[in-house]
Every structure is written in C-alpha cells, then in structure tokens.
Amino acid sequence: MTFFGALGTAVQGINAQAAAIGHISDNVANATTVGYKQVNTLFGDLVNNKLLGDSKNIDSNRHMGVVANAEFGNRRQGTINRDSSTTSIAISGNGFFPVARASGIDTATGEPEAFETSLYYTRLGDFRLENSNRLVNSAGFYLQAIPLDPGQTAPATGGVPQDFVVDTADIDPVETTQVFSTINLPATALVGKQVTTGVGVVDANSEEQNFQVIWTKTAADTWDITINTTQATPNSFGPVTASFLNGTLNALTSGDANVTTTAAGQATLTMTVDYGAGAQTIVLDIGEFNGAFDVTATSGTTQYAGEDREASNIALSQNGLRGGEFQYVSFQEDGQIIYNYANGRSRTGGQMLLANFPEPDKLDRLNGTTFIANGVAGDVVYGQPRDPNSDTGVGSLVAGALEASTVDVAEQMTRLIVAQQAYSLNGQVITASDQMLSRLIDMKR
C-alpha cells in the first residue's frame, strides 16, 4: 500500500540524511587536519518495482526513495601555508606522496620491523626524521623515495619509490688537488715588489692547511712565484719564473726540481706536499698562456698597467672540502632530499617522486589523508615534480609548507542545517503515515 511505501521512503530519507550528517561531522572534525580532503554527499533517486506495461507516469512506480553516496574530492587543492620545519612539504597541483605503513613496530626501539607490501598515497607532508632514520608523517606513514649515492644528483630514468633511509653518517673530507689563481700584476711595479695571496687547503685528515702564493718582481715583465706550505714537507716551493709579453703570460721556468710546470695551453705548477696526513699532490692553475683578462674565469694571470702600481683581480680558490657531522635533512622544491652538515656542506641524498592516477577521486580512502590504489582509479604513474619534459601530470612542490584541509566550515554549517531539516521532515512523514494507518485500522473496526 502507499502508506507502507511512504514509510519505506521516509526511512531511506532518514538514513541518507544521517549519512550526510556523518560526512559533515567528519569534515568539521578535520577542518584543521593537514592534508585532509573534504567528503561531500550526493543523493541519488531510487525507483523500484516498476510495473511492466504501465505508463511512464510517476504513479506507476512503487517504493521510490533515496540513497546517499559519498563524493570524494581527493584531487581538490587545499590552501598552502608556510611551516618552519625543513621536512615539511606541500603539493601544488596533481599528485600524492607515496608512503608505506609499518607491519610491525619494535617495542623496545619504536622502530618499524617490516613494512606492508602495498604502497599508500597521501598529501600529508608534515614529515619528520624518526629513530630509524626514516621520514614519517603525523599519520604514521613512511615516505618512499629514490636513494642516491654520493655524487649522484638525479636518479636514472624511471624508477619506483622504495623504503628510504636517511644516511646520517659524517660526510668525508675531499682532499685538495687543485688551487686556482687569478691576478693582474702591475706592469709599472718596481723590482722587488711583492704580492702575497693565500688560501686554506684541505688534507686527508680534514684539516685546513696553509697554502701561500708570493709574486716577486725581479725584472721588467718578469716575476718569481714562491709557494709557502707552512709546517709541511717541503715547507716551500720555487722560485718559478713567469715572463710576460704584451701583458699576457708568456712562459714558466721552474728553478725547483720539486715543481713541474707546463709550457703551453693551461699554465700550471704541480707539487707534492705532506702536511702530516700523507703525500698530497696539488696543482696550482694560474690561467692560460697568452690568455687575455677574463673576469668570469676561475684562473688567469695578466700584467697590465694600473693607476697605483698595485695588483688587481686577485682571487685564490681550491677544490678541497672539509668533512663534517650530519646535522639535518631538508627538502627542495625539485624533490631533492638534501643532507646538511655542521660545516656548511650539503649533498643530495635522495629524490622524491610524486604519484598520479587517471582518476584520483576514485581512490579508496584509508582515512581522510591517506588513500589506496584500486582498479577504478587507474594505474599509478610516477614523476618528478617540476619536470617540464614529463607527461606524468604531477604538480610542483612547495618546501617548508603544508597543505591545509579543504574543508570550508561555513559551507559545512549550511549543509548541516539543510540535512537536519531534511531529517526532521522525513521523521514527520513517518509520523503522518503512522497516523493515517491508525485511522484506516480504526475505520475497519
């Protein structure tokens, strides 16, 4: 009878509105949850038990009702807010961070014993370095990335994110092998004029040692080069005579058997010194024979007249690096994971990849911030952020920032009022149908 159909429809309406209120409640509760994606409710009309052969009019349908379906906005962009942590990162545009969930935790150390084989996907980028030297977000999921070897700055083409462990070991020193000198000597300087430059070089023990280059004018267009290596063996090299022609370096002649010089092309002085950490060969590069002044060059020697008989364009640099203790890890906006050391050095330790899907809104939700792949969303495609040559469709990264929840509280309050009123009206339908049934029964009596 129509009364029972009305009762069934009203019950369906109450259930649907209850589901909508549940979604609203979850949204409001997570209004400040980083990376949370709002869930909306879509209502669908139901038509059951259509009578065969009847007309298409509404009266030929029985037990009409409604069903509530969740609408997931997994790809919806949240506001990006700055954060002070070096391991906070937000996605602007498409994509998810691939993460893993621990299948067991060591009760003594709190570190993961193993990981589930399935990967999960999230926009929650509030990662921090934990005891196992892994990067984990506040939901307990561990970042998956591509590890890079020292000296490697980018992964090979392709690749799948894997368990990523930060290497917190000290960074090794790089022993100095080359020193680069630029100088413009004063052509009008008097004989006996000295110009001294110096730089600290690094030995095998990561200690900085003295390396001093002294230019002494001995005749017109002629200078002697002496290298002092204090507290080393030998502690001095030279002299090496440098002659000039038309303002440019023309020839090098070594007066020291411990110094080897070149005669053409790049002008270099090669010597072997021991600062106490073992024999160390250092090449002093002073530029190119007959090379003109070049302000962009890392090495170069010229002799041009100046206004005050003083040397100019003086610079001395070297390629050694001191070792240092690991200090912290940070993210860059190209997805590189950077290891930073107490001595100011840094190196690339890994590469983040973003995951994308043809239909990201169809991903299964583990919770409001973490999702699981399925056949409906399509196959996952990994890509590097900010790669203009990639067709993966992933977005860019914002380092030192977090993506806020996509919940609009004012909108949710409006939806709640509507859902409450609809719930109440469905209740009134049940009450009215009950009264009508009671009256019908009374009439039969």
Image (cartoon, helix red, strand yellow):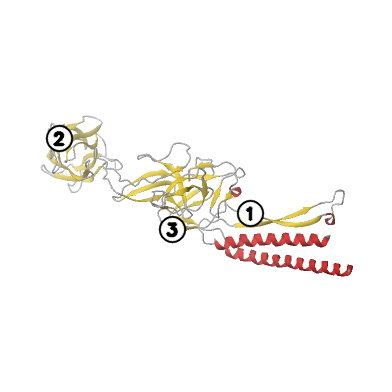
Q: Which residue lies furthest to the right in this view?
A: 444
- The first of marks 3 and 2 along the sequence is 3
Residue 12, x across and y down, in percent: 72, 59
Q: Which of marks 2 and 1 is in front?
A: 1
Q: In which quarter of the image is residue 291?
A: top left
Mark 2 sits on what residue?
241
Q: Which of marks 1 and 3 is in front?
A: 1
Residue 333, x across and y down, in percent: 44, 49
Q: What residue type is labelled 1?
A: Glu
Is 242 placed left or right of 64 in the picture?
left
Residue 137 makes an appearance in the image? yes
Q: Which of 95 and 214 is in front in this view?
A: 95
Task: Give the SS element for disc 1.
Answer: strand
- The first of marks 1 and 3 along the sequence is 1
Query: What mark, if any, has residue 71 been given in the picture?
Result: 1
Residue 38, x across and y down, in percent: 58, 57
Is 374 placed left or right of 226 in the picture?
right
- The first of marks 2 and 1 along the sequence is 1
Is 216 placed left or right of 87 in the picture?
left
Residue 289 makes an appearance in the image? no
Q: Distance between the residues labelled 2 and 1?
A: 81 Å
Crowd around label 1: few <14 · some 14–19 · many ≥20 (10 Å): some
Mark 3 sits on what residue?
83
Residue 152, x across and y down, in percent: 38, 39
